[in-house]
Image (cartoon, rainbow, N blue to C red):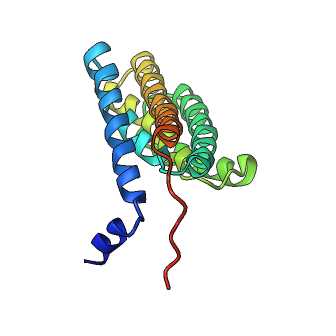
Amino acid sequence: MKWLDRVLKGDRLGLHLAANIFIATVILWLVLRRAAGLNPIWAISSMIASVDPQVHQALKTFRGRIANSLLGCATGLLVLLIGGPSEWKLPIAMSLTALLSTYVIRVQVMWRQAPITAAIVIASMLETHSKTNALELGLRRVGEVIFGCVLGLMVTWLMSKIWPVPPPIKEK
């Protein structure tokens, strides 16, 4: 019952996080599923990683997620374009992207996002077995991931204005 004591005594970060996730999920579902006819799961999973009750933390995560997503997308597309269809492209693209993320980009926050994004792009080829369809599907999924990140940050910022997070209560 410690969690109940924390909620009753003023630590409402969990409530803020749950509200942000609920609002952003509803928006993503309505925009992507209803308006565009797309499956919103990529955007929702991305939004969850970038939403936070505190704007400064959400902004750090957002920056790292965007930089590493773009790197993963570029590397995945490059590997996808080179050579024929091969399942070996997946581990090669993910490893190459991890190296570039850690030694070139060097944005440690969310640096695992780069190989994840490369995997999303490469997996689209394994799913469609066509370079053209894979490029289209991979780019669309990366766009959904970035849209989820942006929306997560926007909801965090908006909710911080509507329902500010109180300062943490120091325990005795």
The quadrant in which the N terminus is found is bottom left
Q: Is residue 24 visible?
A: yes
> Can you name the residue that lies furthest to the front here?
9
Who is closer to the viewer here, 23 or 125?
A: 23
Residue 149, relative to residue 17: is it above or below? above
Query: In x, y percent, where is residue 45?
Result: 37, 42
Q: Furthest residue to the bottom?
A: 172
x and y, in percent, of residue 80 in the image: 51, 30
Q: Quadrant of residue 22?
A: top left
Locate residue 157, reporting x and y percent: 54, 38
Residue 41 in sight here: no
Residue toward you, 129 or 33: 33
What is the residue that sits farthest to the right in this orientation?
104
Give the percent coordinates (x, y) of residue 163.
45, 44
Tell me: residue 82, above or below residue 67: above
Q: Is residue 78 left or right of residue 88?
A: right
Residue placed at 61% from the left, 44% from the top?
Answer: 59
Residue at image location 43% in from the left, 37% down from the top: 120
Q: Nearer the viewer, residue 159 or 113?
A: 159
Foreground residue among 14 and 75: 14
Asked if residue 100 is positioned above or below residue 155 in the image, the reply reads below
Query: Which quadrant holds residue 7?
Result: bottom left
Looking at the image, which residue is at 44% across and 33% down?
Answer: 148
Residue at the location (50% across, 36% down)? 149
